[in-house]
Amino acid sequence: MVLQAPRNNHHALLLVRDYFRAIGTESLPAMIRLLTPKAKIRTSAGGRPGALIQHWQSRFQKLDYRALAGNETAQLSRLELYRSEELAKLSPPRSFALTPKGTELLIYLRVATTHAAAQGSNKIQRLMGPEMTFLLVTDGPGFKIREVYEDFRVP
Protein backbone atom coordinates (compact mmCIF):
# COMPACT_ATOMS: atom_id res chain seq x y z
CA MET A 1 0.00 0.00 0.00
CA VAL A 2 1.31 3.45 -0.95
CA LEU A 3 0.64 6.24 1.52
CA GLN A 4 0.15 9.76 0.23
CA ALA A 5 1.04 12.83 2.26
CA PRO A 6 -2.06 14.77 3.25
CA ARG A 7 -2.73 17.76 1.06
CA ASN A 8 -2.30 21.21 2.51
CA ASN A 9 -5.78 22.46 3.42
CA HIS A 10 -4.46 26.00 3.05
CA HIS A 11 -4.72 25.54 -0.73
CA ALA A 12 -8.41 24.69 -0.31
CA LEU A 13 -9.00 27.81 1.77
CA LEU A 14 -7.30 29.98 -0.86
CA LEU A 15 -9.39 28.38 -3.60
CA VAL A 16 -12.65 29.16 -1.82
CA ARG A 17 -11.45 32.70 -1.04
CA ASP A 18 -10.63 33.22 -4.72
CA TYR A 19 -14.04 31.84 -5.73
CA PHE A 20 -15.75 34.53 -3.66
CA ARG A 21 -13.39 37.18 -5.02
CA ALA A 22 -14.36 36.14 -8.56
CA ILE A 23 -18.02 36.53 -7.58
CA GLY A 24 -17.44 40.02 -6.10
CA THR A 25 -15.64 41.17 -9.23
CA GLU A 26 -18.04 39.32 -11.55
CA SER A 27 -15.03 37.75 -13.25
CA LEU A 28 -15.84 34.61 -15.20
CA PRO A 29 -12.20 34.22 -16.34
CA ALA A 30 -11.03 34.30 -12.70
CA MET A 31 -13.68 31.75 -11.78
CA ILE A 32 -12.89 29.43 -14.69
CA ARG A 33 -9.28 29.08 -13.44
CA LEU A 34 -10.65 27.60 -10.18
CA LEU A 35 -12.90 24.97 -11.76
CA THR A 36 -12.62 21.57 -13.38
CA PRO A 37 -13.67 21.70 -17.06
CA LYS A 38 -17.07 20.16 -16.29
CA ALA A 39 -17.75 21.87 -12.93
CA LYS A 40 -21.39 21.65 -11.86
CA ILE A 41 -23.74 23.43 -9.47
CA ARG A 42 -26.85 22.21 -7.68
CA THR A 43 -29.28 24.87 -6.48
CA SER A 44 -31.74 22.70 -4.58
CA ALA A 45 -31.61 19.52 -2.55
CA GLY A 46 -31.96 16.59 -4.92
CA GLY A 47 -31.89 18.96 -7.89
CA ARG A 48 -30.16 18.18 -11.14
CA PRO A 49 -26.70 19.66 -11.55
CA GLY A 50 -26.13 22.36 -14.14
CA ALA A 51 -22.99 23.86 -15.67
CA LEU A 52 -21.43 26.10 -13.03
CA ILE A 53 -19.95 28.73 -15.31
CA GLN A 54 -23.20 29.21 -17.27
CA HIS A 55 -25.05 29.49 -13.98
CA TRP A 56 -22.78 32.33 -12.82
CA GLN A 57 -22.94 34.01 -16.21
CA SER A 58 -26.73 34.19 -15.82
CA ARG A 59 -26.46 35.47 -12.24
CA PHE A 60 -23.99 38.20 -13.23
CA GLN A 61 -26.39 39.35 -15.97
CA LYS A 62 -29.37 39.56 -13.62
CA LEU A 63 -27.87 40.63 -10.28
CA ASP A 64 -25.16 43.08 -9.19
CA TYR A 65 -22.48 41.13 -7.34
CA ARG A 66 -20.02 44.03 -7.29
CA ALA A 67 -21.69 45.09 -4.04
CA LEU A 68 -19.96 42.09 -2.43
CA ALA A 69 -16.44 43.12 -3.52
CA GLY A 70 -14.25 43.71 -0.48
CA ASN A 71 -16.81 42.23 1.95
CA GLU A 72 -16.36 39.01 3.87
CA THR A 73 -18.98 37.16 1.86
CA ALA A 74 -18.12 33.78 3.36
CA GLN A 75 -17.01 32.95 6.87
CA LEU A 76 -13.76 31.39 5.75
CA SER A 77 -12.39 31.23 9.28
CA ARG A 78 -15.26 28.89 10.18
CA LEU A 79 -15.40 26.64 7.15
CA GLU A 80 -15.48 22.88 7.65
CA LEU A 81 -13.30 20.51 5.62
CA TYR A 82 -13.89 16.77 5.35
CA ARG A 83 -12.60 13.86 3.35
CA SER A 84 -14.90 10.87 2.86
CA GLU A 85 -13.24 8.80 5.60
CA GLU A 86 -13.53 11.72 8.05
CA LEU A 87 -17.24 12.15 7.34
CA ALA A 88 -17.81 8.45 7.98
CA LYS A 89 -16.26 8.78 11.45
CA LEU A 90 -18.24 11.84 12.62
CA SER A 91 -20.28 11.32 15.74
CA PRO A 92 -23.04 12.28 15.64
CA PRO A 93 -23.20 11.65 11.90
CA ARG A 94 -23.69 14.63 9.60
CA SER A 95 -24.96 14.76 6.07
CA PHE A 96 -24.34 17.39 3.44
CA ALA A 97 -25.91 18.14 0.07
CA LEU A 98 -22.79 16.74 -1.63
CA THR A 99 -20.72 13.70 -0.70
CA PRO A 100 -16.98 13.37 -1.31
CA LYS A 101 -15.66 10.20 -2.88
CA GLY A 102 -12.11 8.89 -2.89
CA THR A 103 -9.64 11.75 -2.49
CA GLU A 104 -12.20 14.53 -2.92
CA LEU A 105 -12.45 17.20 -0.25
CA LEU A 106 -15.79 18.55 0.95
CA ILE A 107 -15.96 22.13 2.20
CA TYR A 108 -19.02 23.46 3.99
CA LEU A 109 -19.44 27.09 4.98
CA ARG A 110 -22.01 29.63 6.05
CA VAL A 111 -22.35 32.66 3.83
CA ALA A 112 -21.86 35.85 5.86
CA THR A 113 -23.33 38.31 3.34
CA THR A 114 -26.40 37.04 1.51
CA HIS A 115 -28.02 40.40 0.66
CA ALA A 116 -26.65 43.71 -0.58
CA ALA A 117 -27.77 46.85 -2.38
CA ALA A 118 -26.96 47.11 -6.05
CA GLN A 119 -24.42 49.81 -6.84
CA GLY A 120 -26.16 53.16 -7.26
CA SER A 121 -29.35 51.83 -5.67
CA ASN A 122 -30.92 51.50 -2.24
CA LYS A 123 -32.77 48.35 -3.27
CA ILE A 124 -31.54 45.34 -1.29
CA GLN A 125 -31.27 42.16 -3.32
CA ARG A 126 -30.65 38.57 -2.29
CA LEU A 127 -27.39 37.50 -3.88
CA MET A 128 -26.37 34.27 -2.15
CA GLY A 129 -27.86 31.30 -0.36
CA PRO A 130 -27.22 30.96 3.39
CA GLU A 131 -24.64 28.17 3.02
CA MET A 132 -22.51 26.52 0.38
CA THR A 133 -20.94 23.11 -0.04
CA PHE A 134 -18.01 22.48 -2.37
CA LEU A 135 -16.46 19.29 -3.71
CA LEU A 136 -12.80 19.77 -4.57
CA VAL A 137 -10.57 17.45 -6.55
CA THR A 138 -6.79 17.40 -6.46
CA ASP A 139 -4.94 19.41 -9.07
CA GLY A 140 -1.16 19.35 -8.78
CA PRO A 141 -0.29 20.63 -5.31
CA GLY A 142 -3.72 22.24 -4.91
CA PHE A 143 -7.36 21.73 -5.78
CA LYS A 144 -10.06 22.60 -8.31
CA ILE A 145 -13.80 22.90 -7.72
CA ARG A 146 -15.74 19.99 -9.21
CA GLU A 147 -19.19 20.76 -7.81
CA VAL A 148 -20.98 23.36 -5.69
CA TYR A 149 -24.26 23.23 -3.81
CA GLU A 150 -26.04 26.47 -2.97
CA ASP A 151 -29.75 26.77 -2.21
CA PHE A 152 -30.38 29.74 -4.49
CA ARG A 153 -32.65 30.45 -7.43
CA VAL A 154 -31.86 33.23 -9.88
CA PRO A 155 -34.85 35.61 -10.01
Image: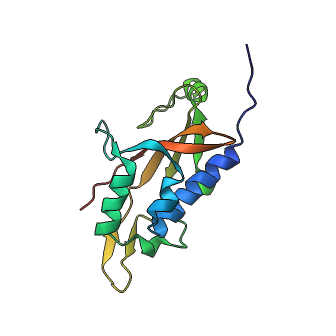
Residue 25: x %, y % from top left: 48, 70
- The residue most toward the left is 155
Q: Number of numbered discs present?
A: 0
- The residue most toward the top is 1
| Residue positioned 56% across, 33% down in the render | 104
| Residue positioned 45% across, 49% down in the render | 132
Q: Is residue 70 above or below residue 149?
A: below
Q: Is residue 59 above or below residue 40?
A: below
Residue 121: x %, y % from top left: 33, 84
Residue 147: x %, y % from top left: 44, 42
Q: Which residue occupies the foreground of this view, 51 or 90?
A: 51
Q: Is residue 112 visible?
A: no
Quadrant location, the C terminus: bottom left
- In the picture, measured across the screen, residue 8 lies left or right of residue 49, that is right
- In the picture, measured across the screen, residue 95 lies left or right of residue 60, that is right
Question: Which colouring convention does the figure follow?
Answer: rainbow
| Residue positioned 52% across, 50% down in the render | 109
- In the picture, measured across the screen, residue 108 lies left or right of residue 59, that is right
Question: Residue 77: which quarter of the image?
Answer: bottom right
Q: Which residue occupies the foreground of this view, 95 or 23?
A: 23
Q: Is residue 87 visible?
A: yes
Q: Which residue occupies the foreground of this view, 48 or 52?
A: 52
| Residue positioned 68% across, 44% down in the render | 9
Question: Residue 61: which quarter of the image?
Answer: bottom left
Quadrant location, the N terminus: top right
Residue 68: x %, y % from top left: 47, 71
